[in-house]
């Protein structure tokens, strides 16, 4: 069952976003009629999964689609869109950082469909509460795009490039940087011949508590307590790992300064 004026879709791209959105909209009742990717084998694999045809070239894209979703890297959007034929359907990209104007200069019907979530081909998630940040060339097109995105998500936010990129910056801290810190912690334990899996309950509880109480209210640890003796001991242990030592020192200082400033404002 579909909820918008769109029915036939073309997916351009074969990465995590293309797989996730393609599958979600297919299950919502839309027809994925065509897939294009620079890697023909990957495009064929995605097309088979979605029950779609494979486009042999950008210039050979079908003109019958109602919506063309450019689920490609930010750097590729300009190049891909400039190589597309003139189409009457709406053309959207899925980037937080690329302005709508990159598409609207070329296509009368254009928009942005940005999911504020980390997506992976092999990990199926419920998109119903994933925020989708939307933008379109005019109000009528925005309404159509909102109806379309609303078929898989209840969280729709109208956001221009300036707003999207701010959310994206925050997401890099909340997702990419946090994930790297997990990597740092796990690598340290494995290098010491210890079990990184022992951190998993801590990781789950840290995230659950931050979501329940708020991250500001959930902060613990030696930096918050001002436990300089423990901090010095940890820094000494990292003497042979200067990058990790610097990271530990900088984050500890940031925690202390942030909470000192917060307490002063109360």
Image (cartoon, rainbow, N blue to C red):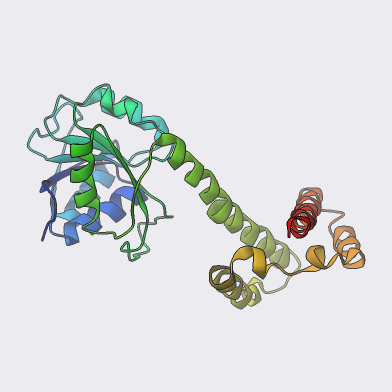
The quadrant in which the C terminus is found is bottom right
Query: In the image, what residue occupies the spot 74% across and 55% down?
Result: 265
Please state which of residues 172 and 257 is positioned toward the viewer in this rendering. Answer: 257
Along the horizontal axis of the image, is 2 left or right of 107?
left
Q: Position of residue 139 (x, y in %)?
A: 22, 37
Left or right of residue 87, residue 103 in this image: right
User: Residue 148: percent from the left, percent from the top?
Assistant: 20, 50
Q: Position of residue 109 (x, y in %)?
A: 19, 31
Q: Is residue 106 above or below residue 33?
A: above
Locate residue 56 relative to residue 124 in the image: left or right. left
Q: Nearer the viewer, residue 49 or 247?
A: 247
The residue at 19%/51% (across/down) is 147
x then y, percent, for residue 58: 20, 29
Q: What residue is rendered at 90% in x and 61% in y?
A: 232
Whether 37 is drawn above or below 120: the answer is above
Residue found at x 14% / y 32%: 61
Q: Relative to residue 52, is residue 36 depicted above or below? A: above
Tell me the quadrant of the picture where the N terminus can be found.
bottom left
């Amino acid at each position: 069952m579909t909820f918008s004026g769109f029915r036939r879709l073309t997916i351009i791209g074969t990465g995590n976003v293309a797989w996730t959105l393609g599958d979600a909209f297919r299950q919502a009742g839309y027809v994925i009629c065509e897939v294009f990717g620079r890697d023909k084998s990957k495009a064929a694999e995605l097309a088979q999964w979605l029950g779609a045809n494979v486009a042999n070239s950008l210039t050979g894209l079908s003109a019958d689609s109602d919506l063309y979703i450019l689920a490609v890297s930010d750097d590729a959007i300009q190049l891909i869109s400039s190589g597309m034929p003139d189409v009457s359907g709406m053309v959207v990209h899925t980037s937080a950082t690329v302005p709508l104007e990159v598409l609207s200069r070329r296509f009368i019907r254009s928009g942005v469909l940005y999911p504020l979530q980390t997506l992976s081909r092999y990990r199926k998630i419920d998109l119903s509460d994933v925020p989708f940040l939307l933008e379109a060339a005019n109000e009528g097109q925005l309404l159509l795009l909102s109806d379309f995105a609303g078929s898989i998500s209840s969280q729709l936010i109208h956001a221009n490039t300036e707003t999207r990129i701010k959310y994206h910056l925050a997401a890099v801290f909340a997702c990419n940087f946090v994930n790297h810190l997990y990597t740092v912690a796990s690598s340290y334990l494995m290098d010491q011949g210890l079990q990184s899996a022992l951190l998993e309950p801590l990781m789950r509880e840290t995230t659950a508590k931050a979501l329940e109480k708020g991250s500001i209210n959930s902060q613990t640890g030696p930096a918050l307590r001002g436990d300089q003796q423990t901090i010095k001991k940890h820094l000494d242990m990292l003497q042979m790992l200067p990058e990790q030592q610097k990271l530990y020192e900088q984050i500890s200082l940031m925690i202390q300064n942030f909470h000192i400033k917060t307490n002063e404002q109360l």
